[in-house]
Image (spheres, helix red, strand yellow):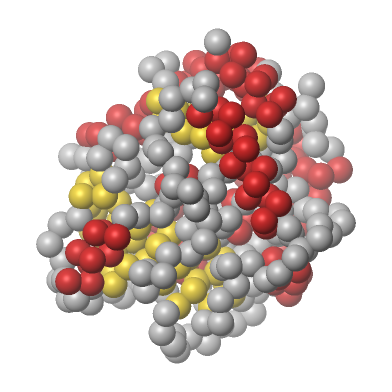
């Protein structure tokens, strides 16, 4: 029985890439990972949504928080001039125009966290767009920060050779032994937290992102799978015509039991996120953290795989 879910392996042969991807803009920083993009703003007042992963908070220890609704819509506060607001594109869906209007009217700036929306066209209203490509495609490392204006940053070398070799090995094992999750998943956990700082993306990842993947075909497959699930399950979000999601989010009362049930059938559904560093007054975010489950519906699968998931959820 084939595995559904898990991180992406290295592609050992190229797809037919028709044209440069939308995220490959002119003004971009090619970083070792997405968190290094957040690190660039560590000396500014940065607002994070109350529904976010702890690693973002660790990267920006002096951040502030704004609330989100039950369906992950931002509830932005009054901002100060030069504040930076991080808007997470949950499940590939960009935010509404009024969010950007509010930020601009306050004299602040917006950073669109597109870590989970590599296949969705970037939002032109954002001052910065941050990608973490390894969450969507099988590159060994990399983060991309698109900038609407020039950023004076000098990037150094890539992270240590030892770390790079470990991440290569993890993704290669994922490809060579796709059913042996007991082998490649521990390897991935060992290198999950990459070094943070002014590190550059490896030349291998840069070349792969620019010319290996057929992003248009990937988007078509994701949309097909998402639409199949949407006809049979209730998602907490409604996608836009332009948005592309690689995961289908559902709210489950007994989430951990359902997650284990699916894992026993080799369907590995991530939890976004089990956080502890978000202030406790954001009770709705903690409720979502305890009940949200994400069904993988990315381009590696077809509707037959999605049908298998639906049948197990009963």
Look at the picture and state if 245 lies above or below 63. Answer: above
Q: Residue furthest left?
A: 78
Whether residue 66 sits left or right of residue 148 in the image: it is left
Q: Where is residue 74 in the image (x, y as percent from the top left)?
A: 26, 50
Q: Look at 68% across and 29% down and name the residue there.
A: 303
Whether residue 173 sits left or right of residue 85 in the image: it is right
Dividing the picture into quarters, in which one does residue 214 lie? bottom right
Q: Look at 58% across and 55% down and name the residue there.
A: 119
Location of the N terminus by quadrant is top right
Q: Look at 20% across and 55% down and name the residue there.
A: 76
Q: Position of residue 218 (x, y in %)?
A: 68, 50
Whether residue 162 sits left or right of residue 195 in the image: it is right
* Of the pair 170 and 66, the residue shown nearer to us: 66
Dividing the picture into quarters, in which one does residue 62 lie? bottom left
Q: Position of residue 135 (x, y in %)?
A: 59, 51
Look at the picture and state if 90 lies above or below 36. Answer: above
Dividing the picture into quarters, in which one does residue 275 lie? top left
Q: Look at 53% across and 44% down and name the residue there.
A: 245
* Of the pair 158 and 286, the residue shown nearer to us: 286
Q: Could you tell me how many numbered marks the image carries?
A: 0
Q: Where is residue 276 in the image (x, y as percent from the top left)?
A: 34, 40
Look at the picture and state if 28 lies above or below 11. Answer: below
User: Is residue 215 in view?
Assistant: yes
User: Is residue 186 in view?
Assistant: no
Whether residue 300 sits left or right of residue 232 in the image: it is right
Location of the C terminus by quadrant is top right
Q: Residue furthest front?
A: 241
């Amino acid at each position: 029985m084939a595995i559904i879910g898990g991180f992406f392996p290295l592609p050992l042969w190229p797809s037919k890439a028709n044209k440069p991807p939308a995220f490959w803009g002119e003004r971009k920083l090619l970083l070792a990972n997405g968190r290094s993009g957040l690190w660039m703003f560590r000396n500014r007042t940065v607002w994070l949504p109350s529904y976010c992963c702890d690693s973002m908070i660790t990267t920006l220890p002096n951040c502030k928080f704004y609330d989100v609704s039950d369906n992950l819509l931002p509830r932005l506060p009054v901002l100060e001039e030069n504040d930076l607001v991080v808007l997470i594109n949950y499940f590939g869906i960009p935010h509404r125009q009024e969010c950007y209007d509010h930020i601009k009217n306050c004299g602040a700036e917006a950073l669109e966290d597109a870590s989970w929306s590599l296949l969705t066209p970037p939002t032109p209203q954002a001052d910065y767009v941050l990608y973490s490509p390894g969450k969507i495609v099988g590159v060994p490392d990399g983060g991309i920060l698109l900038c609407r204006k020039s950023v004076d940053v000098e990037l150094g070398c890539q992270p240590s050779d030892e770390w790079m070799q470990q991440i290569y090995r993890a993704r290669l094992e994922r490809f060579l032994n796709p059913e042996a999750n007991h082998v490649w998943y521990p390897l991935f956990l060992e290198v999950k937290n990459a070094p943070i700082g002014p590190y550059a993306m490896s030349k291998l990842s840069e070349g792969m992102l620019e010319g290996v993947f057929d992003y248009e075909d990937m988007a078509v497959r994701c949309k097909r799978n998402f639409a199949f699930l949407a006809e049979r399950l209730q998602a907490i979000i409604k996608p836009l015509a332009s948005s592309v999601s690689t995961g289908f989010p559902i709210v489950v009362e007994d989430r951990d039991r359902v997650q284990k049930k699916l894992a026993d059938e080799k369907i590995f559904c991530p939890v976004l996120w089990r956080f502890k560093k978000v202030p406790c007054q954001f009770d709705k975010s903690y409720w979502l953290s305890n009940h949200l489950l994400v069904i993988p519906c990315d381009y590696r699968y077809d509707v037959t795989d999605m049908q298998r998931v639906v049948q197990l959820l009963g």
